[in-house]
Image: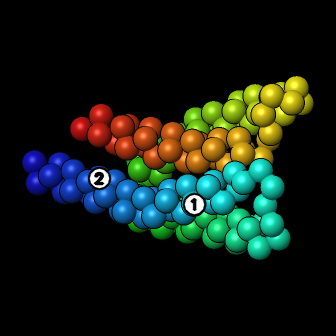
Amino acid sequence: MADEARQDNVTRDARRAIMIDGIPVSLLGMIALALGSSPDPSSAEKGWWLGVTGAFTLSVAWVLVRAFSRADEYQRKIQLESMAIAFAAVLVGLQAAVLLDATDIIGLRPLSEAIVLGGVGIWFTIADLRTRLHR
């Protein structure tokens, strides 16, 4: 019983840590999306967009390293499976975006950032739901 309670606390702490780390990263991604959606950006706007997008990419890597370093074997399995599902969703989304760009319906640039942010959201959601439903 005590071991089960300890495992529940570890699981809850891991979920909380991912959300605490993930919310600022998601906000940074939304800022990058907003900066990159200008139809005719100036050089300064392009610079800001590249800087914020680079910071977003590095912060996602930082969250991943932190999440994997403090997770146990089962949590790592859940994270990797969730990332695989999100990666597949991003690939399908990017393929659809390329087709939309090729037919001149909508540009690839604004869609690509939204697809990546959606993939991160899918990953966080699936990992959180799988952790909650495991109990």
Kind of element beneath mark 2: helix
Vertical arrangement, residue 134 with respect to residue 55, above or below: above
Label whose residue precedes the other's in the sequence (1 or 2): 2
Binning the other alpha carbons within 10 Å of mark 1 as few (below 14), some (14 to 19) or many (20 upward) gives some
Q: Residue at x 84, y 33 (%)?
A: 101
In the picture, the disc for residue 11 is 2
As drawn, the label of residue 95 is none
Q: Is residue 94 left or right of residue 101?
A: left
Query: Circle 1 sits in a helix, a strand or a loop, which is it?
Result: helix
Q: Is residue 59 visible?
A: yes
Name the residue rendered at 80%, 39% in the picture. Answer: 107
Q: What is the quadrant of residue 95 in the picture?
A: top right
Q: Which residue is mark 1?
A: 31
Q: Nearer the viewer, residue 98 or 71?
A: 98
Q: How many marks?
A: 2
* Quarter of the picture holding the C terminus: top left
Where is residue 44? Give x, y as percent.
Answer: 77, 73
